[in-house]
């Protein structure tokens, strides 16, 4: 059973949770605290904490400035976290232009492009090219699903990097890619 906290304690804990993970939704917070979504929204408003979309934009603005290998508008998805030559995280919501009309399944090109641009952004160089990629699509991704991809630098040898990208919808793995990228 979820315990209810007094307003002051709930707001303090809410502030800490959102500082640790700014991408937590109001619905997830309401469930955690055992209160209504409206109560969470009122708490956030009182504390001056913006809604999820604005929090995501704030984090993204800080992260994009670190990327050397591409311009912001070239990126597929929204870059959420980046520690150059270590790891990177992005999110992409599947829109109507990305899916087959009949099946509502996302075209694999978008899923690949999200992973590929994430792998390239991870490298701290002005020119980064994809040398090769080994891909596994685990399940179809549908309209309005959110894909969160995480790229991790597995190995570096001279100017070649092996990067593993895992993409998930919720906790379910939908794509895995191993990219060899070359920096010039």
Image (cartoon, helix red, strand yellow):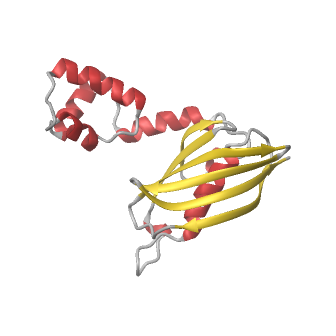
| Spot occupied by residue 95 in the image (x, y as percentages of width and height) | 44, 63
| Spot occupied by residue 180 in the image (x, y as percentages of width and height) | 75, 55
Q: Would residue 38 be visible to someone looking at this image? A: yes
In the image, residue 89 sits, relative to residue 116, either above or below, namely above
Name the residue located 63 percent from the left edge and 52 percent from the top edge.
164
Left or right: residue 63 versus residue 8 is right
* Image quadrant occupied by the N terminus: top left
Name the residue located 44 percent from the left edge and 66 percent from the top edge.
141
Name the residue located 77 percent from the left edge and 44 percent from the top edge.
156
In the image, residue 91 sits, relative to residue 15, either above or below, namely below
Left or right: residue 9 versus residue 140 is left
| Spot occupied by residue 112 in the image (x, y as percentages of width and height) | 60, 63
- Determine the residue located farthest toward the bottom in the rendered image: 102
Q: Would residue 74 be visible to someone looking at this image? A: no
| Spot occupied by residue 9 in the image (x, y as percentages of width and height) | 21, 19
Name the residue located 70 percent from the left edge and 38 percent from the top edge.
85
Question: For this rendering, which residue is in front, 142 or 160?
Answer: 160
């Amino acid at each position: 059973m979820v315990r209810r906290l007094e307003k002051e304690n709930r707001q303090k804990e809410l502030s800490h949770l959102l500082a640790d993970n700014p991408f937590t939704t109001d619905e997830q917070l309401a469930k955690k605290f055992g209160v209504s979504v409206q109560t969470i929204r009122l708490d956030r408003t009182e504390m001056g904490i913006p809604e999820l979309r604005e929090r995501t934009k704030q984090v993204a603005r800080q992260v994009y400035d670190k990327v050397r290998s591409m311009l912001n508008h070239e990126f597929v998805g929204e870059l959420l976290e980046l520690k150059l030559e270590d790891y990177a995280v992005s999110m992409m919501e599947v829109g109507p232009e990305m899916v087959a009309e009949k099946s509502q399944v996302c075209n694999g090109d978008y899923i690949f492009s999200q992973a590929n641009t994430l792998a390239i952004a991870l490298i701290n160089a002005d020119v980064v090219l994809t040398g090769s990629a080994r891909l596994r699509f685990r399940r179809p991704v549908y309209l309005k699903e959110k894909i969160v991809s995480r790229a991790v630098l597995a190995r570096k040898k001279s100017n070649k990097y092996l990067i593993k990208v895992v993409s998930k919808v919720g906790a379910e793995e939908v794509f895995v890619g191993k990219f060899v990228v070359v920096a010039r």
